[in-house]
Image (cartoon, rainbow, N blue to C red):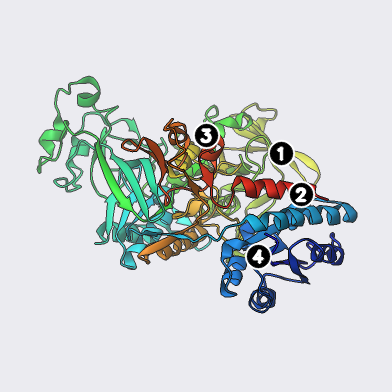
Amino acid sequence: MADEKIAVYFCDCGTNIAGKVDVDEVVKWAAEQPNVTVAREYKYMCSDPGQDLIKTDIKELGVTRVVVAACSPTMHEPTFRKAAADGGLNPFLLQMANVREHCSWVTEDPVEATEKAKRILSAQIHRLPFNEALQPIEVPVNPDVMVVGAGIAGIEAALKLADAGKKVFVVERDPSIGGHMAMFDKTFPTLDCSACILTPKMSALGKHPNITLMAYSEVTEVSGYVGNFKVKVRKKARYVDTDKCTGCAACTEACVVQKVKSEFDVGLGYRPAIYIPFPQAVPLKATIDPAKCLTLSKGKCAKQSCVSACGPGAIDFGQQDEQVELDVGAIIMATGFELFDCEREARYGYGRLANVITSLEFERLSNASGPTGGHIVMKNGEAPKSVAILHCVGSRDENYQEFCSRVCCMYSLKFAHLIKEHLPETEVYELYIDMRAYGKGYEEFYKRLMDEGVHFIRGRAAEVSDVALAPEEEGRLVVKAEDTLLGIMRRLPVDMVILSAGLSPRRDAKEVAQTFGFGCSANGFYLERHPKLEPASTMTDGVFLAGACQYPKDIPDAVAQAGAAAAGALTFVNNPTVKVEPTISYIDPEKCSGCHICVGLCPHAAIQFNAEKEVAEVIEAACKGCGVCVAACGSNVPQQRGYLDKQIFAEIEGALAL
């Protein structure tokens, strides 16, 4: 190892590193270390001049190993590997020493930071002689793509891919695509009719020759690896032959069970046991609710009027769930969000007080296709004379969700406008913490509402009650709140309270993420690869994120991310092969005893047992290099390239050498 020529490059990262670490001292020290041929400092190593230093030294000085002391490898390891490769060096003979996140950013004392930087750098200098030249693994790519979830984000991603000529499988859990956006009346700040801008895209997806729509279906299992995912989908029985069903709705009118609470109307309206979710549904096919249908739930229906009403004979009570297996090269997750459960905020009385409703319920009340025909009315059918809209219910709250849900301020302003539009004489109160009108046209919309006579009260509501303390409060709801601008406590007697509920991750988000091989962040939403540079990618190559499943966002941002996810998927499926990192596990068949331990523990199903040879074998393209098998084997047979025992021990020795 003595003939190795190691080059050390220390990045100032502006003042991120140099502001805490004595760079000159560290570079001078590095130049004196064994096998180090050259040590340099540069202000921004990731810049073109910084990369040129690496290329030039490799070519002119015969450098055989490189250490870059800079930021996290997650940020710039690919950048520096490419620079090494351009200089003629195998990229895996380069190591990064993280002296930003692991040192300068977390160490207060400059002297301690400087000493720590030396130790971090020493660890990589000692490790480098044991690095091996590795080559990326190339695997063939299936050109088809799957989109899971078909709200506006999923629809946009699917159409982008299909228009690019790719075959797309769209899997949607509900009987129709459209998601939450299909339930809205108007969209802020332009007040477009939500259905008017959504349903053409829904129709385009349903008719696109490159799209196979699998509505009322769920993904049950995912295996394989980037470019070659094998997905099992359960198509739930509709008990209706979709090839025969024309969507005429004659069966829905004939059904004897008419009083089932409608999911689409958030329980405010009713549907029959056999139903089409809404008139613009895609696919426009009927679905039988097996829990409410008398034939399916009790074994008998005296009339079976749906059967006699269906001219094409599409009703099929013998239909069963169907398992379908699909092969795709990339996957886009667009599974959306759930509304915060307002019953958890007991102080606001939702579910207990008659005219306290959620934001989604108001969307359906104000919608012309909703249960009241667009008339904003209370439970008794009368129009409210005063309405309070409470912001940040379940958001920006340490007891529930600390994050801002981003859309609540703006849809609350939209609600105020709709109330004033429908009921000009109604008094509207907006109770807010801060008004966050951050998007294009949003601040202007806020100012517009000020001119429409809406009352803005800065302060979070403390409680909603029906206890009257004054004659004007009799028979009304009373909102108690602190007005932080006036510095007083207020009691607002109103007829209706709208809770602007925050956006929450879906209840099964963690389980779904595990199925697809990635994780969730601390707040429960799907975890992206990098919050700034790769917000549409996951840690699983070939799996992308779009829409509010990744974090709360409005419709324009969801559509934009859907486009980014589609572009990310195209980068994989547009090529015949994809390169996979070679830092993966391998098993020496001469040493393997065939105990099966690693087979069962591999979280990526990347190890299979060869019954003929009686040994475990690694499926290289499926391995993610997590190291579980390496740690689990009692005989120390599995090893991971790039993280061999001799490399790890050398790194430890280097860190302790000072």
- Amino acid type at circle 3 is Cys
* Badge nearest the viewer, 1 or 2: 2
Q: CA distance from mark 1 to mark 2?
A: 57 Å
Q: Earlier in the sequence, mark 4 or mark 1?
A: 4
User: Dot 2, crowdedness within 10 Å: few (<14), some or many (≥20)?
Assistant: many
In the rendered image, which residue does mark 2 sit on?
A: 655
Q: Residue at x 39, y 61 (%)?
A: 197
Q: Earlier in the sequence, mark 2 or mark 3?
A: 3
* Badge nearest the viewer, 4 or 1: 4
Q: How many marks?
A: 4
Position of residue 398 in the picture relative to residue 495 (left or right): right
Viewer-nearest residue: 424 or 530 = 530
Q: Is residue 282 visible?
A: no
Q: Does dot 2 land on a helix, a strand or a loop?
A: helix
Q: Earlier in the sequence, mark 4 or mark 2?
A: 4
Q: Which mark is residue 633?
A: 3
Q: Earlier in the sequence, mark 1 or mark 2?
A: 1
- Asked if the residue at tag 2 contacts the one at tag 1, i.e. Cβ–Cβ closer than 8 Å, the answer is no
Which quadrant: the N terminus?
A: bottom right
In the rendered image, which residue does mark 1 sit on?
A: 481
Q: CA distance from mark 4 to mark 1?
A: 65 Å
Q: CA distance from mark 2 to mark 3?
A: 27 Å
Q: Residue at x 30, y 67 (%)?
A: 165
Position of residue 439 in the picture relative to residue 543 (left or right): right
Q: Tell me where residue 528 appears, x and y as whole percent.
A: 55, 52
- Amino acid type at circle 2 is Ala
In the rendered image, which residue does mark 4 sit on?
A: 65
Viewer-nearest residue: 475 or 628 = 628
- Asked if the residue at tag 3 contacts the one at tag 2, i.e. Cβ–Cβ closer than 8 Å, the answer is no
Q: Earlier in the sequence, mark 4 or mark 3?
A: 4
Q: Residue at x 31, y 42 (%)?
A: 233
